[in-house]
Image (cartoon, helix red, strand yellow):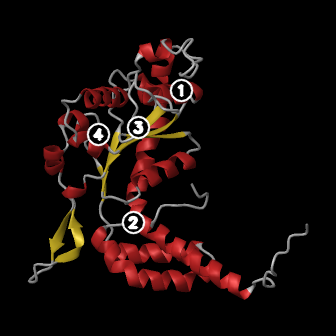
Amino acid sequence: MNSTARPTQYQMSVFNELRQLAADYYDFDWRSLPVTPRMNVLICSSTGAGKTFISALLARELKLPFLRLEYGGWIVTGARARGGLQTLSLLYSFLDRHEKGIIVLDELDKLATQDSAGEWTRAVHLEVFSVLDRRVLPGIVEGAQGNEDSPLFSLRPEDIQRRLERGYFIVGSGAWQHLWHPQRAAGFGLPSNRVDRPTYDQLLQTVPPEILNRFRADILYLGPLTKADYESLVKETLLRLPPEFGPFIREAAARSLEEAVRTQKGYRWIEELVASAIRILRISKSNKFSLEPAREWVDPS
């Protein structure tokens, strides 16, 4: 992640609430209480809103290690990893190396829509839920001894679980794109630049209770970017780029802004604008400072 990155104005309210929740988790001595508070937080966002970005930014600000686990890339225990670690082994190895950290479980919207009848899907569900419940499966740690395809652990399973219980702030996230409904402009019946924020009841109808019940009830929402959000994002981006990028990004933004709003490209749109500006700048500099034309090559032999 770029060391100069920071939340945009659009993301700041959710980022600040993440900060407060992380402070509740790390800075208050709740571990001595007779009741364990529910600390997992869920971010419901539209596609491309930057939910993983702000979680990683929080980890960098707190100087904590960060691990992102994706549903789509989950490798269940016992499956052939094809060069990568099975997901729980990867997680437990991370816990073994770091006393504290932040874990993001991404793409939980896909977890909610999958048919649970399949053996693979049921296995992924059980493993994801074990992480959200902060349970370590001892057999994975104990079975790693003498297995060259598994990481070596310096801690016992109960010590790894203690770290998961007491040292790791867990953020769940999902797009649930269909929950975001554009408002209608008065008298015209056309979508406006604003969207309705999903209610908790709407989320409950779409997201199975076994997922929602593993998080705090105060869900964080990052809705689709409006036209004004995209325009503000361009301005914020230009403040961080060399001045030479300005004309090309403004021109490209003007051409593609309506499409970005319509297709909800999110922050990928900014990346596309920067990439297109790089191409123009590279070619213009090459033409301006081109070297002497290459002469015909002659074989010295």
Considering every residue shown, the one lying at the far front of the view is 301
Residue 201: where, in percent of width, then height?
Answer: 13, 48
Q: Which residue is mark 2?
A: 10
What secondary structure is found at the residue carrying circle 1? helix
Q: Label 1 amino acid? A: Ser
* Dot 4 and dot 3 residues touching (CB under 8 Å): no
Asked if labels 1 and 3 touch by Cβ distance under 8 angstroms, the answer is no
| Cβ atoms under marks 1 and 4 closer than 8 Å | no
Q: Is residue 234 left or right of residue 221?
A: right
Q: Amino acid at mark 4?
A: Arg
The mark found on residue 93 in the picture is: 1
Task: Measuring from the top left, give residue 47's x and y in whole percent.
Answer: 33, 58
Q: CA distance from mark 2 to mark 4?
A: 23 Å
> What residue do we see at 35% from left, 77% from top?
228
Foreground disc of the pair 4, 3: 3
Q: Which residue is mark 4?
A: 216
Question: In the rendered image, which residue does mark 3 sit on?
Answer: 170
Label 3 vs 1, first from the N-terminus: 1
Q: Earlier in the sequence, mark 4 or mark 3?
A: 3
Residue 245 position by quadrant: bottom right
Mark 1 vs mark 2, foreground winner is: 1
Element class at badge 4: loop
Q: Nearer the viewer, mark 1 or mark 4?
A: 1
**Discs 1, 2 touching: Cβ within 8 Å:** no
Residue visible at 39% across and 53% down?
A: 51
* Above or below, 77 relative to 224: above
Q: Residues within 10 Å of mark 1 (few under 14, many from 20)?
A: many
Considering only order in the chain, which callout, 4 or 2, is on the residue closer to the N terminus? 2
Q: Is residue 202 or residue 36 the one in the foreground?
A: 202
Say whether disc 1 or disc 4 marks the residue closer to the N-terminus: 1
- Using the numbered discs, state the Cα–Cα distance from disc 1 to disc 4 in whole angstroms: 27 Å
Q: CA distance from mark 1 to mark 2?
A: 35 Å
